[in-house]
Amino acid sequence: MDDKRQRILDAATKVLAEKGFEYATISEIAREAGMSTGLIYSYFKNKMDVQLSLILIFLQTINEMNSQRVAVLRNPFDKLYTFLHNCEDLLLKDDSSLCRVKVLHEALPHIIGLKDKGLMQKRAEILAANNYLIATIDEIMLKGQQEGVFDSTLKPTVMRQVLSGAIERIVYGLFFKRFTGEEIGYDKQDAHDALVRVIETFIKK
């Protein structure tokens, strides 16, 4: 990726996380990136374009990681654990990763009702990438049930929602703790242990 484009995206991740989409501005992103506002507009149409790009890159990255690390495994539990590890790599590694948590958390309401054709195309790419991610998790869950590894009393789609919801809420808490200084009662290791425990609840007794 172009170095300047990457600098813009890194700066936008920080600004959008700290200010929120509604209050963040292109000028603040430019200031954080150390470049002119005009240069930002040479790469992105507007603030929405920047946010959509961040979401799309995240989804493409985790899908690629899953293709490289998950697809080569045979045991469904190992696949699911590796999927969790991939999420942690992208969301919990450092402060920048935690900023990504906030951007993703509040992104969906802003991608509905787009009218610009270019942004609508990017939205379509996001939905396609998200559907691929969902299909990957559902396939792991279903395969685990078929092989007698996971409990078959729940639908794979429900199990996926339970895990996804747990990841979202637990990881968001860590973002909140880091950027407000308020104590939430757990740290990264606690979060990891809890998410592994969620996965273990799916194992057939």
Image: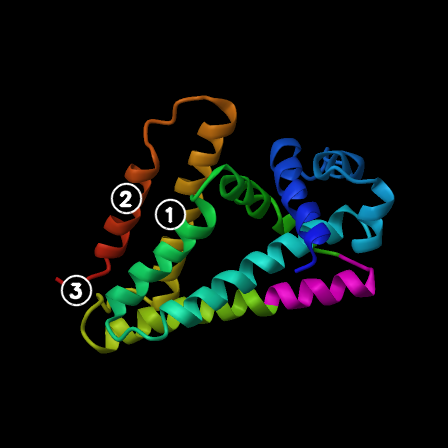
Q: Quadrant of the C terminus?
A: bottom left
Determine whether the residue tagged by mark 3 lies in a helix, strand or loop.
Answer: loop
Residue drawn at x 43%, y 43% as measured from the top left = 92
Q: Which residues are magenta?
A: 114-127
Q: Can you tell which quarter of the image residue 66 is in?
A: bottom left
Inspect the magenta stretch and tell me whether residue 193 lies in it. Answer: no
From the image, tell me which residue sits under label 3: 204
> Which comes before the other along the chain, label 1 or label 2?
1
- Closer-to-camera residue (161/105): 105
Looking at the rendered image, the disc whose residue lies closer to the viewer, 3 or 2, is 2
> Which comes before the other along the chain, label 3 or label 2?
2
Residue 152 spot, x, y in % from top left: 24, 69
Q: Quadrant of the N terminus?
A: bottom right
- Closer-to-camera residue (74/149): 74
Q: Cβ–Cβ below 8 Å for labels 3 and 1?
A: no
Determine whether the residue tagged by mark 1 lies in a helix, strand or loop.
Answer: helix
Inspect the magenta stretch and tell me whether residue 124 lies in it. Answer: yes
From the image, tell me which residue sits under label 2: 194
For marks 3 and 2, give the CA distance: 18 Å
